[in-house]
Image: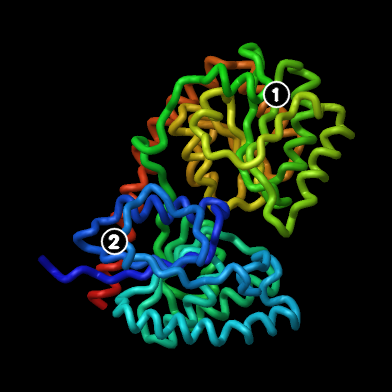
Amino acid sequence: MAERIRVAYLDHAADVGGGAEEALVDLLRFVDRDLVDALLVVAERTDWLRGVEFAEDEIVRFFPESEEILERSRDTLGDSRSNLRSFSRSVGPVRQLARLLKRHRVDIVHTNSLKTHVLGGLAARMARKPLVWDVRDILDPGPARKLLLNVARLTRPHIIAMSAAVGRFLEPAHCATTVVHGGRSPEHFRQVAPSDELRAELGLTPDDEVITVIARLTPWKGHMVLLDAFRAVHVERPQARLVVVGAPTFWEETYLTELQERATDLGCADAIRWTGFRDDIPAILALTDLMVLPSFSEPFGIVIVEAMIAGKPVIVCDTGGPPEIVEDGATGLIVPTGKVGPLADAMVDLLSHPDRAHEMGQRGRERAVAQFDIRHSVRQIEDIYRRIMAG
């Protein structure tokens, strides 16, 4: 048997942050262990690492929770003197990480988050190790985007872009880029039967028409636009209920209150359920009639794939990665980004035509299973490793 490729996977998060950590768990669950010898370099506290068996010597707990740069919002990176101080304080950890990569005889460094792209990228360059960036973000023009592009030009990673839209955002770096769409395993992310207990917990009745949004509570996910649109939906269809699944990060803790106050001002607060973070998404989707993701510039939207696996029609916006997943009019509807009227009309349309919505959901499931199975994505990543080692 050929010698395995020693890949160090870097992720700084303590908790599940977006879908990055779940995607890494899926990658490690399905990667060919005869090809890849995995080493996880993670935070001192890691609550998201589950579902994959690792030996004790395969995990290195490196990133401290108190590290200043790791506690910052991605949107504030690179924009002030305080951030420059953060990076100067990170020089020592970068050197320590470079020594760690050498000590463990790593062949390839695979970074899994924006902050490890920067810190891990610099460490990989210092250690003279090939670098892979697994990128699932689209940054707006500004200091953080400039910083990331500058680090890419310096460290020359092979970029795995979660969508063609992500790839376009990184084009100015002129790095080798492969688009690898995200995916889920239909066996691990299953369709489940509706639960009467969960329905009661959420304050829903069997007659309710359930619209679900599953996303971190942050402004670019478009919740404010969705609330405005839902008010119009609820006027026309009083049995409509909006289930909001997700929580804000610690630097946006007030955003939930802003959303709830907006719902009260609109007069539709009684028809909205705020669940916070949930780890029973298949069960929530089982109660759902349609799933909406109203993001302004969504890099991909793995929850779209999850809803499609669950057989649910989806409504998404026409920017970023979602148009690469959804076939408009066949597996869901694509509406103009940030427009209240078209979003409301699309929701009313699918609620008013349940047979059409059901057919879209079935077509969506067929498309998700055929094109967005995580195993297809993992095979593409394995090919990238082979090419890097051959090169």
Mark 2 lies on residue = 382
Picture coordinates of residue 331, whole percent (x, y): 49, 31
Q: Measure how far apart labels 2 and 1 are at the Cα level.
A: 43 Å
Instruction: Name the secondary structure under disc 2.
Output: helix
* Amino acid type of the residue that numbered disc 2 sits on in the rendered structure: Glu
Picture coordinates of residue 248, whole percent (x, y): 69, 50
Badge 2: residue crowd in 10 Å (few <14, some 14–19, many ≥20): some
Give the colour scheme of this rendering. Answer: rainbow
Instruction: Name the secondary structure under disc 1.
Output: strand
Q: Cβ–Cβ below 8 Å for labels 2 and 1?
A: no
Badge 1: residue crowd in 10 Å (few <14, some 14–19, many ≥20): many
Q: Residue furthest front?
A: 56
Q: Quadrant of the N terminus?
A: bottom left
In the foreground, 3 or 156: 3
> As displayed, is residue 314 above or below residue 375?
above
* Amino acid type of the residue that numbered disc 1 sits on in the rendered structure: Arg
